[in-house]
Image (tube, rainbow, N blue to C red):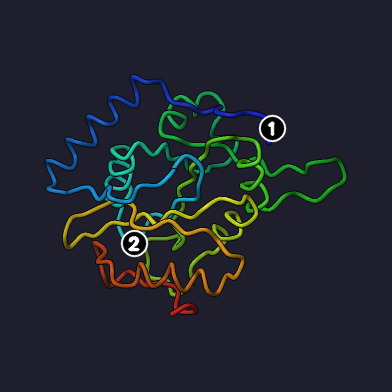
């Protein structure tokens, strides 16, 4: 397959090196350990980060994925990757979503379609998503990530934060079968017993229990 831009948002080696040092320091200071036992190709996938009940989740998740050499990106409005915001957002891993129509006269693309196009344009891309969509308790997850994975033909990596044991990493990689109910049941089964920072704020998608 021909990719329009194989690695448009690669971070400078110096930033990657400093990020790893900071990540090791964070894990040391807070007493966290890394679960990097899963040996998989993380260069091209949708990566779930859950449970998500605190702002600290992003800190520990980013640290874990940096130590695992997973070049995670997260999506923002395209305008946020323009000057001057790009000076701050791009080094963090932001990637702009442009939902403009592909052709004049067509309807504006959905977020799912725009994210699928990102994968089609790039040889390597790892997009981090939080299916809960909020730090508040919800019983229905946003499942757009699944449709993105199917449409882009990429696996779904199950990143997690176990606050009880202070362990973070990626526990499983799922190849979407196209049977959303079956695949979501497997995803929910993985996350349902993982202790979040605030248990009262967490629930898996009850449609798939």
Looking at the picture, does residue 121 appear above or below residue 181? above
Task: Kindly identify the residue that appears in the image at 14 percent across and 46 percent down.
Answer: 30
Please state which of residues 150 and 194 is positioned toward the viewer in this rendering.
Answer: 150
* Placement of 157 over or under 65, stated as above or below: below
SS at badge 1: loop
Mark drawn on residue 197: none
Marks 1 & 2, CB-CB < 8 Å contact: no
The answer to whether residue 63 is above or below residue 184 is above
Q: Residues within 10 Å of mark 2 (few under 14, many from 20)?
A: many
Residue 139 versus residue 153: which sits nearer the camera?
153
Q: Which residue is mark 2?
A: 51
Query: Mark 1 or mark 2: which comes first in sequence?
Result: 1
Q: Nearer the viewer, mark 1 or mark 2?
A: 1
Which x, y percent locates residue 179? 59, 70
Residue 18, position as x, y percentages in the image: 27, 25
In this picture, residue 117 sits left or right of residue 89:
right
x and y percentages locating residue 33 in the rendered image? 18, 48
| The C terminus sits in image quarter | bottom left
- Foreground pick, 40 / 157: 40
- Which quadrant of the figure has residue 194? bottom left
Which quadrant does the N terminus fall into? top right
Q: Which residue: 24% across, 60% down?
A: 162
Left/right of residue 31 with respect to residue 117 in the rendered view: left
- Residue at figure coordinates x 61%, y 51% from the top left: 153
Mark 1 to mark 2: distance in Å?
36 Å
Tally of marks: 2
The numbered dot on residue 2 is: 1
**Mark 1 packing: few (<14 Cα in 10 Å), some, or many (20+)?**
few
């Amino acid at each position: 397959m021909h990719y329009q831009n194989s690695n448009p948002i690669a971070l400078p080696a110096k930033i990657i090196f400093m990020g790893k040092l900071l990540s090791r320091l964070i894990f040391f200071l807070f007493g966290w350990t890394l679960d990097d036992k899963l040996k998989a190709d993380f260069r091209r996938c949708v990566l779930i980060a859950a449970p998500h009940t605190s702002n600290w989740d992003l800190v520990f998740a980013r640290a874990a994925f940096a130590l695992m050499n997973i070049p995670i990106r997260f999506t923002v409005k395209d305008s946020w990757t323009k000057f001057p915001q790009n000076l701050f957002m791009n080094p963090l891993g932001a990637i702009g979503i442009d939902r403009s129509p592909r052709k004049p006269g067509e309807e504006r693309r959905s977020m799912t379609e725009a994210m699928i196009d990102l994968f089609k344009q790039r040889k390597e891309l790892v997009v981090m998503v939080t299916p809960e969509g909020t730090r508040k308790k919800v019983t229905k997850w946003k499942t757009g990530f699944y449709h993105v994975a199917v449409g882009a033909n990429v696996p779904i990596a199950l990143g997690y934060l176990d606050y009880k044991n202070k362990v973070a990493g990626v526990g499983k990689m799922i190849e979407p079968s196209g049977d959303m109910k079956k695949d979501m049941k497997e995803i929910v089964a993985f996350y349902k017993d993982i202790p979040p920072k605030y248990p009262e704020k967490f629930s898996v998608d009850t449609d798939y229990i």
